[in-house]
């Protein structure tokens, strides 16, 4: 505690970072940011942009950078991204961070990632294959991929391999088998996760997507199909790309730790 207070008094850290060190979170007008989540849980805290104003999203994102060196924002649109870029450029970080933070907006995945100039991203020896059945499933798959990558895993995207033509997934099976964990995003009837889980030895996480229409549409059939899978897999909620990516990242982290022993 004394070190933190002395660093604050010397101007080496700001109030937000001091609060996060002492309390585990930082308070903003937009809410409290859980700066200790990655240390406590192994995954970075994410800012959900949905339901917040761009100004609120930007305030929480800059607090994240000030306290942890990076920000991970999900369900963000172009207006959110623009607000974050402006706020990040105005950040008054210490002299070592004279370069503006790097801001990456994946428009399709709806994610914004900000890294301070001196942020050292985690990286470990484990690969996650993020598989999407069709182009309509790519946005949710992309969110999972970005989150898993921020946890520290290597990401291999495998797109447009839906079961309407089994050759598309079969000609990628050797590639997918090389991964340590597999996330499979699929909408409509959601058959692809079950097929993939029957082809690989790695843990598979089914990510139902809210595509499809009529009876069982909006991800209902995909979710129920994954829950009834005859192949062994784990299922997350409809469109829960963050949860799938984070869970896959935690599994990959454990695999990496086992390899290091």
Image (cartoon, rainbow, N blue to C red):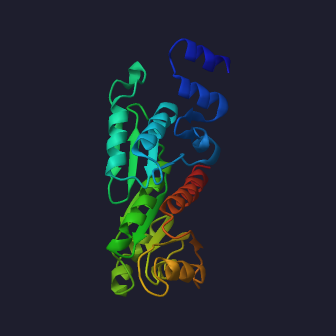
Q: Quadrant of residue 228?
A: bottom right
| Residue at image coords 57%, 38% | 35
Q: Is residue 114 above or below residue 50?
A: above
Residue at the top extreme of this rendering: 10
How many callouts does the rendering have?
0
Q: Is residue 47 above or below residue 247?
A: above
Say which of 157 and 22 sits in front.
22
| Residue at image coords 48%, 43% | 122
Say which of 163 and 219 sits in front.
219
Q: Quadrant of the N terminus?
A: top right
Q: Percent from the top left, x then y, of residue 189?
A: 46, 84
Q: Quadrant of residue 214?
A: bottom left
| Residue at image coords 49%, 84% | 216
Q: Percent from the top left, x then y, of residue 204?
A: 53, 71
| Residue at image coords 60%, 28% | 19
Residue 248 in view: yes
Q: Percent from the top left, x then y, of residue 40?
A: 64, 43
Q: Is residue 106 left or right of residue 68?
A: left
Residue 69 in view: no
Say which of 249 and 178 sits in front.
249
Say which of 260 and 108 sits in front.
108
Q: Is residue 156 above or below residue 22?
A: below
Q: Quadrant of residue 233?
A: bottom right
Q: Is residue 24 left or right of residue 153?
A: right
Q: Percent from the top left, x then y, of residue 183?
A: 48, 67
């Amino acid at each position: 505690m004394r070190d933190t207070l002395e660093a604050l008094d010397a101007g080496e850290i700001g109030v937000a970072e001091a609060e996060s060190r002492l309390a585990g979170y930082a308070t903003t007008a937009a809410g409290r940011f859980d700066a200790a989540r990655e240390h406590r849980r192994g995954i970075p805290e994410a800012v959900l942009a949905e339901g917040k104003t761009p100004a609120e999203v930007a305030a929480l994102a800059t607090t994240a950078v000030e306290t942890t060196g990076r920000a991970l924002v999900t369900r963000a649109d172009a207006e959110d991204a623009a607000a974050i870029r402006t706020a990040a450029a105005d950040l008054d970080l210490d002299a070592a961070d004279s370069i503006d933070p790097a801001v990456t907006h994946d428009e399709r995945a709806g994610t914004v990632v900000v890294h301070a100039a001196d942020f050292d991203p985690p990286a470990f020896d484990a690969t996650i294959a993020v598989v999407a059945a069709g182009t309509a499933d790519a946005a949710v798959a992309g969110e999972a991929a970005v989150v898993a990558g921020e946890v520290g895993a290597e990401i291999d995207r495998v797109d447009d391999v839906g079961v309407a033509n089994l050759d598309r997934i079969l000609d990628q099976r050797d590639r997918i088998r090389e991964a340590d964990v597999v996330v499979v995003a699929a909408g409509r009837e959601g058959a692809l996760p079950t097929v993939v889980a029957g082809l690989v030895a790695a843990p598979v996480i089914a990510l139902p997507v809210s595509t499809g229409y009529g009876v069982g549409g909006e991800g209902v059939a995909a979710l129920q199909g994954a829950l009834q899978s005859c192949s062994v897999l784990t299922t997350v909620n409809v469109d829960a790309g963050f949860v799938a990516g984070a869970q896959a990242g935690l599994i990959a982290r454990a695999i990496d730790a086992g390899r290091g022993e």
